[in-house]
Structure formats: structure tokens, C-alpha cells
Image (cartoon, coloured by chain):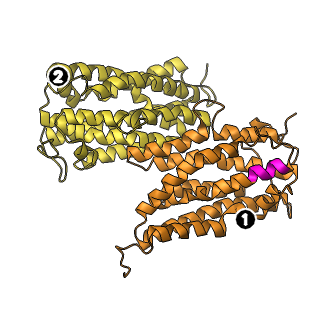
Chain colours: A yellow, B orange
Amino acid sequence: MTNTPQTPAQTPVEFEARLRQIGADLYHDKHPFHIRLHSGGCSMDQVRAWVVNRYYYQTRIPMKDAAFMSRVSDPNLRRIWRSRIEDHDGTAEGEGGIARWLKLARAVGLDPDYVSSEVGIMPATRFAVDAYVRFVRDEPLLPAVASSLTEMFAPQIHRDRIAGLMKHYDFATLEATTYFRQRLNEAPKDVAFGLQWVLDHALTQADQDAAARALVFKTQVLWAQLDALWSAYVEPGHIPPGAWQPADGLLP
Amino acid sequence: MTNTPQTPAQTPVEFEARLRQIGADLYHDKHPFHIRLHSGGCSMDQVRAWVVNRYYYQTRIPMKDAAFMSRVSDPNLRRIWRSRIEDHDGTAEGEGGIARWLKLARAVGLDPDYVSSEVGIMPATRFAVDAYVRFVRDEPLLPAVASSLTEMFAPQIHRDRIAGLMKHYDFATLEATTYFRQRLNEAPKDVAFGLQWVLDHALTQADQDAAARALVFKTQVLWAQLDALWSAYVEPGHIPPGAWQPADGLLP
């Protein structure tokens, strides 16, 4: 079989393997900060810095999903995608993934009001996360969907995180880690749909390349957030002006 | 009391009256096309042209609402706004406002698949509707919310339309007009929330002016769609190239 622009460069099976290899090579489960976090090597201040900054990512995910829906003219695709926003925002105040993240904040001794005020988030965190929202708002639908496929690699990191946190940290109760447990229930349906959609729509080599680039980009969005945490709160420990300082925003 | 930038130019009661006056002056219930439609003066082809073109507006409303949500960082505001998308897209295939509009299409003899293909929609319809989606995506949140307040004036036009259509047209059964009946249930909650939000947030003269301009803009979006229908399908009857022609897309 020769490659022409009309034939797929890779079969769906080959292309899925290519996408999964991106996760094996680049997903942030291999970042030193996560290794340190899951093995109990992070100080409580380092855990708190992660909780404060990661909150920004949590809050922007439903905004990213709404930006995607704003470009989808098919009511069926919009309806399926809407469940992602429901997962994060919940159906009543105090429900949903963002509220569950604030339970984790409370468990590590942070005032949820401080965390949700978004004060203290590092500019580097905002830049990375905002780049993701803009990507999904501006790029074609195929890369926009493909960029969500880091969810393929999330269940393992959530399982490692639950086990690692509960083994090494007193704060890590069932209640504190409910966010990650719930994502183990939610993510598989999103992955199953998103992956199939990408496999169905990436039929040319150009489209497969664009989808793969989008997934690489997304791994960079996640990795850059951990680099910034390491730089500010591990070594060299240069906390940027205005960013969270240990003792800021603690519960009384 | 003197006006300074810190004091409201109008009290909330005065400002609400100003917004309502915009509806009294500019809402499309006074457009000759609607008067003709509701009084039984439209031919079936003119009714069909309206159904085909208005479908485009229906489909873009949830995209507009998603664009709004993509800019809202408050999970509570996003959750409240999400119900608008649910109203239009439904919770299962075949439900929701867009599906109900397609019941109207079928009732007037149009193939729902033709209508939902978006073939035959006039460029002038697209330009007006797309301008609305862009407005909500790009303008500050206050004008974005204010632009939705034409819903304040919608219940009366829906009641007039249901009564007018059922009096004058054989197609206008309970089933065919379910879209408008359902909007009578849904719109009041949206209006109550949106109006209060605008009154709460438009506290300076500059903000009140911006909100009022947004509402005027939205009345123009609605009015321009009817001007285009009149020009193409009433008089002079110059149907633009590529737009719906009588006999296109009819059910067998």
C-alpha cells in the first residue's frame, strides 16, 4: 500500500499505539515532582504549593470544555461533551471535581477560600494552563479533542497518587483523596469517547500528525506546571514575586 | 445626589425600566414579517423560509452559551448558565429545543435532515447570528449577559405566535408548536437570573450604558434576520444565490 494524501499513514491500531507511546515517553507521571510527591518525599509546604497551583488547572478544565463546545455545531457531540463540565462543576453548589479539590486543600491545611481566590498561583502555571484553553478555543476540532487524550494516561497516575499519598501522608484520608477516586470513575468514559473520535477523524497522515502534536503539546502543558513547582518550591527554591509563600492561606 | 463614576447613573429600578423600553422600541415582535406570520399572512413557503433560517439561530444559541461559559471562572455561575445549553441540546438524542424546532420543520413539510444540514440558510442570517456568538465570546461578561435579555420580551411573542399560528395554519398543531410552549417554561428562569445579574453588576453609568448597548445590539441581530427573510421571500423576493428555494428540502 502506498501512502497518498487520501490513505491513512497508519491504521487505527498503529495510530493508537503511536498516541499511547507519547504518553509512555512524555506524560508527567515521570516528572521528578510527581515521583517525589507519590513517594512521600514532598514536605507539606511542597504539597500545599502543588494544591494551590493545580487548583488553577482544575478550574480551567471546564472553561476549556466550554470553549470546545462553543465551536461544535452538532448537538449530539455537544451533549456528550457536556458531561465533562458536569463532572467538574457538579449539579449543585459544593459538588463536582472543583469542590472535591477544595476538600483536598482543606485536608492539607489550606483555607479553601484562599485557594479558590486564585491568589498565589504562579504566573508560569497560568501561562501553561491558559495556553491549553486557547489551544482548544482556536485550533481545529481534531487537535482540540486529541489534546484531551492525556486522560488515557491519568488512571494509572491517580491510582499511584492515591496509594502513595495514603501510605506517606497523614492528611491523605479517603475524604481528602476523593477527587482522584472520582476521576477513576469519570475519566474512562471520556477517554473511550475521545480516543474513538480521534481515531475516526484522523484518517490522513496530516491529521494524524496534527493529533499527535496536540497530545505532545498537552503533555508539555502538564510538565511545565511541575517544572515551575520544582523551581519555586524544591530547588533552587526561587518563589516568584506574588506567588504562594509557606504560611499563606492556612486554616486557623 | 450627584453623579460620580462611583455612583450609579440610574437606580436599579430606573435601569430596568430603561432596558424594558429597549424591548418596547426595538424587539422584533414589531417587525412586519412577524406581524404577517402571526396574522396568517405568510404563505407556506414564507413559513418554511423562516423555519429553515431560524434553525441556524437555534443551533448557535447553545454555542453562544458555551462561549460565555468558557470565559466564566466561577463554577456557580457556570453551573447556572449550563441549564441553557441543557434546554437546547436536551439530555438524550431527540430531546431539547433544537429537536423541537425540527418537529416544527416536519410539520411545515420540510425534511428535518435537510433543515439540520444547514444548506439553504441565507448568508445574511449567518452573518447576524455569527455576530452574536462572537459578541458573547469577545465582549466583557456584563454586555455578554445583557445581550441575552431579549428573553425578557420573548414570552409575549411566543404566546402571540402560538395563538396566531394555531388560528391561521393547519400545520400548527400542539406537537408542531411544542418548541414555543416549552420556551414559555424555560425562559422565565433565565430572564430572572440574567436580569438580576445585570442589575447587580451594572453599577456605574458606563456599565449601564454598555449593557444597554448590548441589548440594542441583540435586538438588531434578531431584526436583521427578519429583514433578510422579507427581502428574499416577500418583497422584492430576491432570493440570494444558494439560499433555500421553494420545493427544496420538502418531505416526500
Observer-nearest residue: A15 or B156?
B156
Residue B217 in the image: above or below residue A70: below
Observer-nearest residue: A10 or B8?
B8
Residue A149 shown left or right of residue B187 in the figure: left
Residue B184 appearing in the image: yes
* Amino acid type indicated by mark 2: Ser
Q: Residues within 10 Å of mark 1 (few under 14, many from 20)?
A: some
Q: Residue at x 61, y 22 (%)?
A: A2
Quadrant including the N terminus of chain A:
top right
Q: Position of residue B81 (x, y in %)?
A: 49, 46
Dot label at residue A206: none
Observer-nearest residue: A173 or A84?
A173
Q: Chain of mark 2?
A: A
Residue A213 appearing in the image: no
Observer-nearest residue: B157 or A146?
B157
Residue A126 in the image: above or below residue B25: above
Front tag of 1 and 2:
1
Dot label at residue A39: 2
Q: How many marks?
A: 2
Residue B131 placement: quadrant: bottom right
Q: Residue at x 32, y 47 (%)?
A: A127
Circle 1 — which element?
A: helix
Q: Does the magenta portion include B162?
A: yes
Q: Position of residue A40 (x, y in %)?
A: 15, 24
Q: Which residue range is magenta in the image? A: B161-167
Circle 2 — which element?
A: loop
> From mark 1 to mark 2, how far is it between C-alphas?
69 Å
Dot label at residue B30: 1
Q: Residue at x 53, y 35 (%)?
A: A142
